[in-house]
Image (tube, rainbow, N blue to C red):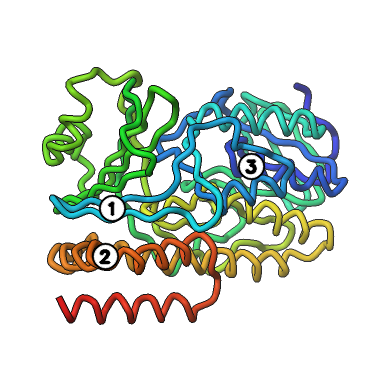
Amino acid sequence: MQLPESTDVFVIGGGPAGLAAAIAARRRGLSVTVADPERPPVDKACGEGIMPDGLAAARELGIELEAEGQPFQGIRFCQGKDAVKADFPLGRGFGIRRTHLHGILIEHAECAGVRLAWGTRVTSIGERRVFTVAGATEAQWIVGADGGNSAVRTWAGLNASGRDRRRFGFRRHYPVAPWSPYMELHWGEDCQLYITPTGAREICVVVISGNSRLRLDQALARFPAVAERLGGVSPSTPERGSLSVSRRLDRVARGRVALIGDASGSVDAITGEGICLLFQQAQALAGALLEGNLALYEVRHREIGRRPARMAALMLLLDRHARLRRRTIRALSAHPALFSRLLSMHVEENSLVPYFLNTLSLGWRLLTL
């Protein structure tokens, strides 16, 4: 489409984060243009599971996702012969193909009146101006939603980071009926395997590790129980890889530029909270834009990220220390109520108090094993 001469908000990046930001801003009456060099649907290797808090955040944007995916009722941890499971305290999670989710968000953005400029590359930004291969557009606000390697972040001088740890993920889909009503996380010595139901006869399988050379075929050989479940079935999609980055930026806004989604920092994919974060960030950003005060977004962005960052730190600690991980999963298996409290804290609680109380309780259980 032809770019407008001016817009209230210009979003650079048309993935889920950019579309969520656009929808939230339009719901507040702002004119919005989105530009992306790709053409939909845009895919990304991820676990494709959306937790109940992510569904609630989408609902606040007027987006109902429950009817669009395959439900799962909780989380199951597996380590060798030990396993523990817990149901979500409220609601269910849903597995949704990334391309399907992208299509849903595009439809909502179009219905909201967002201008979508696919196949349009942004070349630079000014104080209130966005330059693209198709020309320049005046913008009151510029939103960088262009991913972990964000050019907008560089142009705005927002690259300063307090943490930057990378792991590698690879994903495939298999035409196999889900064998469990849970999203499963299988722990290995140097990797994790995620199994998410995405359809009545389809599962999404992802391996994440610090080894960029570890692929799914190699990983599955380390998890014979999962390999047996797959029964030699050929995958229905090719293997796709992506980075899982733990990154906390010093700032996510400057002047009239704000960042959202992976461009604004990220937590490791081990938490499964990426989609929830971007929906919550979109709401916070839209409110700040309406108020004309991006400092409000800075504060809220930090608040939104605290809970998943705490959980990521705990789970990555288990990833790094095999003995601690084995003892922890045995302790949780012996005391499943504690795992239920940890899961409840992950998808509901924001206070530091439950986090420390549950961590202390887990530590005591480990000492008494």
| SS at badge 1 | strand
Query: Mark on residue 231?
Result: none
How many angstroms separate mark 2 from mark 1 (CA)? 9 Å
| SS at badge 3 | helix
**In the drawing, does residue 55 fall left or right of residue 242?**
right
Tags 2 and 1 in contact by the CB under 8 Å rule? Answer: yes
At horizontal 47% and vertical 46% (from top left) the residue drawn is 149
Q: Nearer the viewer, residue 108 or 298?
A: 108
Mark found first going from the N terminus, 1 or 3: 3
Disc 1 residue type? Phe
Query: Mark on residue 77?
Result: 1
Mark found first going from the N terminus, 3 or 2: 3
How many angstroms separate mark 1 from mark 3 (CA)? 32 Å
Which percent across, then down, holds residue 195? 32, 39
Q: Quadrant of the N terminus?
A: top right
Reading the image, the residue beneath label 2 is 332
At horizontal 55% and vertical 24% (from top left) the residue drawn is 41
Q: How many marks?
A: 3
Query: Mark on residue 18?
Result: 3
Name which quarter of the figure residue 213 lies in: top left
Which of pointers 1 and 3 indicates the residue nearer the eye?
1
| SS at badge 2 | helix
Mark 1 surroundings within 10 Å by alpha-carbon count, few (fewer than 14), some (14 through 19), many (20 or more): many
Disc 2 residue type? Leu
Disc 3 residue type? Gly
How many angstroms separate mark 3 from mark 2 (CA)? 38 Å
Which percent across, then down, holds residue 48? 45, 38
At horizontal 48% and vertical 30% (from top left) the residue drawn is 97
